[in-house]
Image (spheres, rainbow, N blue to C red):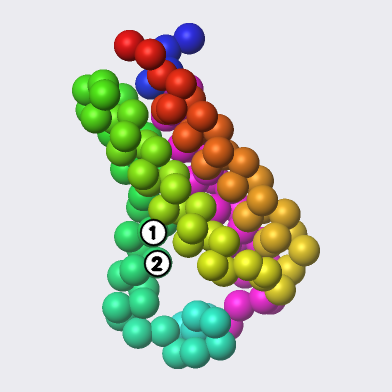
């Protein structure tokens, strides 16, 4: 199977995992609207959250459109940065949240592995 399709699919899975965590956080009552980490969120904080959540979405498109070897390195860098970001947030309050972060870390590792071993 084409590595581009695999990478794109794993980026979709990662995005959906992040969104599932956000939805569960809302339904579990583990968040207060307008706050991040117990503080009133600023427009800058919301912008940063939007940029971070947009990374997997953009990577779906880039995985299918950017030429090799550039997409190989873009995928590795993006996945590593998301791993670092997620590790900095650990541990989360909810058991489900920590579980989903681990699932997300596995998806990022899969992305790195496929990109790293990709031979054109």
Q: Residue furthest right?
A: 95
The residue that appears at 39% across and 38% down in the rendered structure is 76
Q: Which residue is mark 1?
A: 52
Q: How far from the left and from the top, in percent, is residue 90?
A: 63, 67
Asked if residue 43 lies in the magenta stretch, the reply is: no
The residue that appears at 54% across and 67% down in the rendered structure is 88
Q: Which residues are magenta?
A: 5-32
The residue that appears at 30% across and 78% down in the rendered structure is 44
Q: Is residue 69 above or below residue 112?
A: above
Which quadrant is the C terminus positioned in?
A: top left
Q: Residues within 10 Å of mark 1 (few under 14, many from 20)?
A: some
Determine whether the residue tagged by mark 1 lies in a helix, strand or loop. Answer: helix
Q: CA distance from mark 1 to mark 2?
A: 5 Å
Q: How far from the left and from the top, in percent, is residue 6?
A: 47, 22
Q: Is residue 93 above or below residue 75?
A: below
Determine whether the residue tagged by mark 2 lies in a helix, strand or loop. Answer: helix
Q: How far from the left and from the top, in percent, is residue 115?
A: 42, 27
Residue 51 seen in render = yes
Q: Which residue is mark 2?
A: 49
Q: Is residue 15 above or below residue 40?
A: above
The residue that appears at 46% across and 53% down in the rendered structure is 82
Checking the image for residue 30, the label placed there is none
**Tally of marks:** 2
């Amino acid at each position: 199977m084409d590595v581009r399709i695999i990478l794109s699919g794993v980026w979709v899975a990662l995005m959906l995992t992040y969104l599932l965590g956000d939805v569960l956080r809302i339904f579990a009552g583990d968040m207060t609207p307008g706050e991040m980490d117990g503080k009133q969120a600023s427009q800058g904080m919301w912008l940063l959250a939007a940029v971070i959540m947009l990374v997997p979405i953009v990577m779906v498109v880039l995985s299918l459109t950017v030429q090799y070897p550039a997409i190989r390195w873009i995928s590795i860098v993006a996945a590593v940065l998301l791993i670092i970001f997620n590790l900095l947030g650990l541990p989360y309050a909810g058991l489900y949240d920590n579980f989903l972060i681990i699932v997300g870390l596995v998806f990022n590792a899969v992305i790195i592995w496929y990109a790293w071993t990709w031979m054109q």
